[in-house]
Image: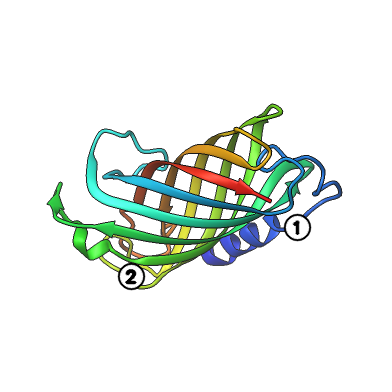
Amino acid sequence: MKINISIFIIASIFITTAGAYASNPFMGDNRHQIAFNIGQGVNSGFLIPPPTQLVPFYLLHLQYSQPTTFFRIPARQSINIGQTLGWGEKYGWDWDKYTIPMIYLSEDIALLHGDNWYFSTGIGMGLQAQQNERIGSKLLFQFKLIAGYRITDDFGVEMFMQHFSNANTAIENNSYAFYGMGITYSF
């Protein structure tokens, strides 16, 4: 039941409304965007984790996006390819075991924005290549908070907090959490 509701929610966010190609705070008047993000892992199971227990766990993330709207709110829909990189042990976890590629679809919604800046939230759903004892499922759900600034019409920077979990679809659900930053190129 939880999976069916989650799939319905994720599918419904990709329904666009009129005006999807008007000026968008994420990418201006451009129709495409590529982003590269780097994240520092945090050992926390909270949806918005405190950045107090940094761990030897990192995220490399490539994202392709197009502008859209979500109930007339500016948004972007994306396909994401990520790679987690971990090594060593800290806080009782062997981070080497969590070096896993992932792919997921996401939607970011601009909650507050000006001409060149935005604060947004996003959700997504996808798969990691293998399950493990930290997230007991290949199925991943993603939640993200983003603060971004478009330096020029083409380039921007973002800071983010990103949380991955299985949304309680499996017994183990300790999540992955990252704080990081990235660059965007819109064209």
Vertical side of 51 occupied by 138: above or below? below
The residue drawn where x is 69% and y is 37% is 25
- Measured as percent of width and height from the top left, residue 128 is found at 40, 68
In the rendered structure, the answer to whether residue 156 lies left or right of residue 128 reads: right
Q: Quadrant of the N terminus?
A: bottom right
Residue behind mark 1: 15
In the rendered structure, the answer to whether residue 11 lies left or right of residue 97 reads: right
Badge 1, how many Cα within 10 Å: few under 14, some, many 20+? Answer: few
Which residue occupies the foreground of this view, 120 or 10? Answer: 120
Badge 2, how many Cα within 10 Å: few under 14, some, many 20+? Answer: some
Vertical side of 134 occupied by 23: above or below? above
Q: Residue furthest bottom?
A: 130
Vertical side of 140 occupied by 52: above or below? above
- Measured as percent of width and height from the top left, residue 127 is found at 46, 68
In the rendered structure, the answer to whether residue 108 lies left or right of residue 103 reads: right
Instruction: Identify the image quadrant of residue 132.
Output: bottom left
- Measured as percent of width and height from the top left, residue 71 is found at 77, 44
Element on which disc 1 rests: loop
- Measured as percent of width and height from the top left, residue 51 is found at 31, 34
Element on which disc 2 rests: loop
Residue behind mark 2: 131
Name the residue type under label 1. Answer: Ile
The residue drawn where x is 14% and y is 48% is 90
Name the residue type under label 2. Answer: Gln
Badge 1 or badge 2: first in the primary sequence: 1
The residue drawn where x is 59% and y is 48% is 185
Instruction: Identify the image quadrant of residue 95.
Output: bottom left
